Amino acid sequence: MNQTICFCFSYSEEDIRQDLLVHQGKSSILARIIDEKREGNCRCHDFHPQRRWCLPDVRRVVDEVSKELNLIV
């Protein structure tokens, strides 16, 4: 399934999967979201359907995909 996980930056599960493969188990997407949040550039309350921060969902998908692909995070 290729559902949107990060609504601020339009990242999907497939984006996270490809990111982990390209970066050998490290997520540049997760790092970017953390940096953007730190700088005040996330607007989850405007974009997320449940009006909540997406970072827990992104972390969950990173963990799930990492385990599925047997990658070290």
Image (cartoon, grey):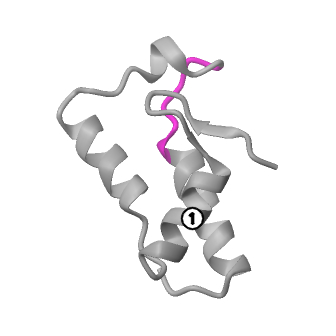
Tell me which corner region of the image, top left, top right, bottom left or bottom right, holds residue 39: top left
Outermost residue toward the left in this view = 39
Residue 1 is inside the magenta segment: no
Left-right relation of 5 to 41? right
Outermost residue toward the right in this view = 1
- The kind of residue on which mark 1 rests is Gln
The image shows residue 54, relative to residue 52, as above or below, that is below
Tell me which corner region of the image, top left, top right, bottom left or bottom right, holds residue 23: bottom left
Residue 57, position in %: x, y?
Answer: 59, 46
Residue 16, position in %: x, y?
Answer: 56, 57
Instruction: Write the residue at 73% across / 40% down.
Output: 3
Residue 51 is inside the magenta segment: yes
Residue receiving disc 1: 18
Residue 73, position in %: x, y?
Answer: 47, 80
Q: Mostly what secondary structure, the magenta segment?
A: loop
**How many numbered marks does the figure carry?**
1
| Mark 1, secondary structure of its residue | helix
Outermost residue toward the top in this view = 46
Left-right relation of 35 to 18? left
Instruction: Write the residue at 66% across / 69% down.
Output: 65
Foreground residue among 39 and 28: 28
Instruction: Write the residue at 36% across / 44% down.
Output: 33
Left-right relation of 70 to 58? right
The image shows residue 52, relative to residue 33, as above or below, that is above
Q: Residues within 10 Å of mark 1 (few under 14, many from 20)?
A: some
Magenta segment = 50-55
Instruction: Write the residue at 47% across / 74% down.
Output: 22
The image shows residue 20, relative to residue 49, as above or below, that is below
